[in-house]
Image: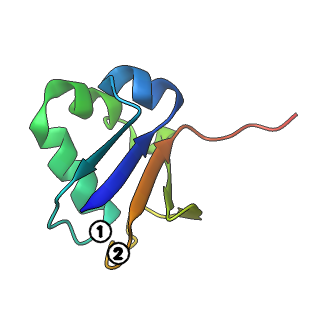
Amino acid sequence: MIDILYFAWVRERIGLPRERIDTQAATVNDLVAELSAREERYAVAFADRAALRVALDQELSEFSAPLDGVREVAFFPPMTGG
């Protein structure tokens, strides 16, 4: 089982702040493909991966990163500073 957290407009498009799923995905890209195939709302949220960032167990990561041993995946838009 893996916890998935959604923030900002990603949460708004999917309609959930978090969920726990059982997945066989090997990488974040695989997980995104699996989620996008579930329902249209996921496909819309993940349509432009360049507009997304991902953190694995609260560490910024890449979409090519493996999920082996990961307990939490968070998706969010790029952060801006000011």
What amino acid is labelled 2 in the image? Pro
Q: Say few, some or many: other residues with alpha carbon within 10 Å of mark 1 (under 14 / 14 to 19 / 20 or more).
A: some
Q: Position of residue 8 (x, y in %)?
A: 53, 28
Compared to 44, does 49 lie above or below?
A: below
Q: Residue at x 43, y 30 (%)?
A: 10
Q: Say few, some or many: other residues with alpha carbon within 10 Å of mark 2 (under 14 / 14 to 19 / 20 or more).
A: some
Please say if the residues under marks 1 and 2 sit with CB atoms less than 8 Å apart. Answer: yes
Q: Residue at x 74, y 37 (%)?
A: 80
Q: Position of residue 57 (x, y in %)?
A: 50, 65
Count of numbered marks: 2
The residue pinned by badge 2 equals 66
The residue pinned by badge 1 equals 27
Q: Position of residue 59 (x, y in %)?
A: 59, 65
Q: Quadrant of residue 15?
A: top left
What amino acid is labelled 1 in the image? Thr
Lateral position of residue 11 relative to residue 37, left or right: right
Lateral position of residue 11 relative to residue 8, left or right: left
Q: Quadrant of residue 18?
A: top left
